[in-house]
Structures are given as C-alpha cells and as structure tokens.
Image (cartoon, helix red, strand yellow):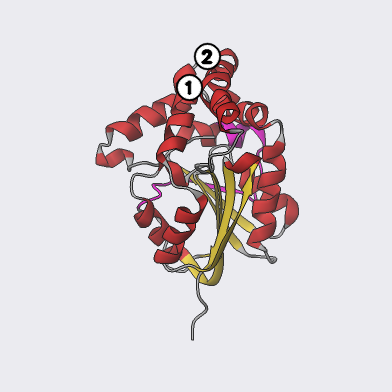
Amino acid sequence: MGRSTDKDPASGGDQAARVREMFTHIAHRYDLMNSLMTGGQDVRWRQEVIRRAALLPRARILDLGAGTGYLAREALRQQPACRPVAADFTLKMMQVGKERTPDSRLDWCGADALRLPFPDETFEAIVSGFLLRNVGDLPGALREQYRVLKPGGRMVALDTTQPKRTLLTPLINVHLNIVIPHLGRLVTGVREAYVYLPESTRAFLNAEDLAAEMVAAGFHGVSFRRLMLGTIAIHWGRRKDKG
C-alpha cells in the first residue's frame, strides 16, 4: 500500500524520487506487507475492484500505479479474454511482478499518472490500488484517467481514506502509527516506507471529498464503499456515454 506517481520523475520532483527509491527497496516484499497489514483482506478488495470494472471479453483495462500488477492479473483471472496494461513509474516493482508471474497477455508500461502515454479514449476500464492519495495533482490525475477512458468506460479506485472519528480511532492510530512501521521494518528492512503510509493517509481526503473530486473531473454515477473501519474505500464512476 503506497506507491506514488506524485510527479513525473523526469520533471524533477524530490518527493517522487524519494518515493520511487523507497519502493524500489521494498519491491520484493510489497505484496507480502499488504497482506500482513490488512489481514489478507486486500485480496477480496482487489477482487471487488475488478468485479466493479465489469469487464467484457477483449476489453482494454489499465492498471494504473500497478506495482507488481496484482489488479491486472486479477482482471485476467476474472476475464481471461481482456487486454490489460499494467503501468507504474517504479520500474523495479513492475520487474518483480513480471518475474513472478510472467504472462504474455499482460503488457507493462512505465507511466506518469499525470501525463499518461495513451491516446484519448483508449480503455474500457481503469483501475488503481493505493495510487490516488500519492499523486501530486489529484484533479489532474483524475482528468487524465477520464481522458483515456472510452465513453461509458469505468474507473474504479481502491485507496486509503481518512476515517471518521469514532471510539475506535485510538486503536486505528496505534495500528497506523506504531504497528505498521514496526512490521514494515521487520519484514522489509525499510521502516521509512511504512512511516510514509500513515503520513500520506492523514494528508489525504475522506471518502466523500474524493467522490466529489471524481465528479468535478467529469465522472458520472460516482459512489464508494468504506472498508476496514473506514480507513480504506473503493470508489467508482464512469465516463458519460456519447450523445
């Protein structure tokens, strides 16, 4: 949980360079940490993301901020005749994913979420896992996804969100600020990456505000479902049909 395409690496963003280096170091343990942090629930969440993408045979789907390509592989599992592209700006993450599960049906692409290297109206679906909170220009990233979606195409995003304050808030904070950084250090040897996770979560929007950003970018039928005590949400919307 936590790759970033904060700024295009070619544009010189210091944060982007720091985050890319950080996740290059944890690439081999990235999926394991996601499973440990979520108690294995991330598998079901990603399955739901692809179900909500409603893929038809031959549909082109973009897994943006793909990391090791988990969502793209899940798309192939649910719809073997789809045509997925896994895109990320951390090349090591994609290299690890490609080595682990080579599949000739899956294309890989280095890409910046703010300047996608695809023509307008390319994909029937765009999915992402733990991407949006990390981009340096959220409205710009959403507009780019809208641009490369075909009319009627679906966008589905899984991400951390700010939870509402409840009686469980102190326990959530302990998990985010103490348990996850220590677990990250033990499993990956890179504590910084899992200090970054709660920091970026605190700085991100709540589920309602993220939905509003999607509407502002042009998406229709926007809705969301909270998960894991409100610390995670799946958001979805679609590009309006022509006419």
- Distance between mark 1 and mark 2 Cα atoms: 9 Å
Q: Is residue 124 visible?
A: no
Please rate how many residues cluster around mark 1, counting C-alpha atoms within 10 Å: few if below 14, some from 14 to 19, many from 20: some
- Give residue 5's quadrant in the image: top left
In this rendering, the answer to whether 89 lies above or below 145 is above
Give percent across and percent down for residue 134.
42, 41
Q: Residue at x 60, y 34 (%)?
A: 167
Q: Residue at x 67, y 63 (%)?
A: 55
Badge 1 or badge 2: first in the primary sequence: 1
Q: Is residue 232 visible?
A: yes
Give percent across and percent down for residue 51.
70, 57
In this rendering, the answer to whether 219 lies above or below 191 is below
Residue nearest the observer in this picture, 32 or 236: 236
Give percent across and percent down for residue 80.
73, 56
Label 1–label 2 contact, CB within 8 A: yes
Q: Residue at x 32, y 32 (%)?
A: 15
What amino acid is at disc 2?
Answer: Gly
Q: Which mark is residue 189?
A: 2
Q: Which mark is residue 25?
A: 1
Secondary structure beneath label 1:
helix
Q: Is residue 93 left or right of residue 213?
A: right
Which residue is the extreme one toward the front?
Answer: 167
Which residue is the extreme one toward the left?
Answer: 12
Specify whether residue 99 is painted magenta.
Answer: yes
Q: Is residue 92 left or right of residue 73?
A: left
Q: Magenta stretch: give its range.
A: 96-114
Q: Residue at x 51, y 43 (%)?
A: 161
Looking at the rendered image, the quarter that the N terminus falls into is top right
What amino acid is at disc 1?
Answer: His
